[in-house]
Image (tube, rainbow, N blue to C red):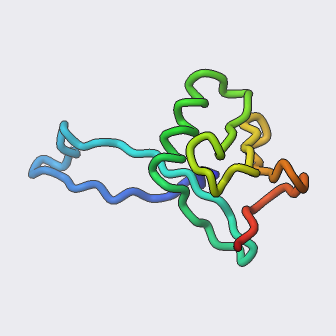
């Protein structure tokens, strides 16, 4: 899930503003069983953002973009990820 307040280092030009051609990227993360945040791949992040644009209260089926994540769904309203086959809420189990 996205972590509020995560920092971003932005190169500045001589007048102290970010360059106009700087691309902005959203990185979504999930909390593992050790309490560490792990980023989703760029493709998964892009998929989450596209679903959010269409229905911010719906859900994201992660398996639509990454077969390894097929059991996982993100409920956008609660901002929780759960595993469809077990009903497990929270972090993604590691294999």
**Foreground: 37 or 66?**
66
Indicate the quadrant where residue 18 lies.
Answer: top left
Relative to 74, is 90 above or below? below
Q: Residue at x 24, y 43 (%)?
A: 22
Where's residue 45, x and y in %?
A: 52, 46
Where's residue 43, x and y in %?
A: 47, 46
- Of all residues, the one furthest to the front in this rendering is 67
- Of all residues, the one furthest to the right in this rendering is 87
- Of all residues, the one furthest to the bottom in this rendering is 34
Whether residue 91 sits left or right of residue 30 in the image: it is right
Indicate the quadrant where residue 75 lies.
Answer: top right
- Of all residues, the one furthest to the left in this rendering is 14
- The mark tally for this picture is 0
Q: Residue at x 70, y 69 (%)?
A: 32
Whether residue 53 sits left or right of residue 91 in the image: it is left
Whether residue 35 sits left or right of residue 9 in the image: it is right
Where's residue 76, x and y in %?
A: 72, 36
Relative to 93, is 25 above or below? above
Relative to 64, is 88 above or below? below
Quadrant location of the C terminus in the rendered image: bottom right
Q: Residue at x 80, y 58 (%)?
A: 90
Where's residue 46, x and y in %?
A: 48, 40
């Amino acid at each position: 899930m996205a972590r509020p307040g995560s920092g971003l280092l932005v190169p500045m030009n001589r007048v102290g503003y970010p360059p106009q051609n700087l691309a902005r990227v959203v990185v979504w993360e999930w909390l593992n069983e050790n309490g560490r945040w792990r980023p989703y791949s760029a493709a998964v992040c892009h998929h989450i953002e596209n679903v959010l644009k269409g229905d911010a209260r719906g859900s994201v089926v992660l398996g639509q973009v990454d077969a390894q994540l097929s059991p996982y769904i993100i409920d956008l309203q609660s901002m929780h990820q759960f595993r469809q086959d077990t009903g497990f809420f929270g972090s993604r189990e590691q294999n």
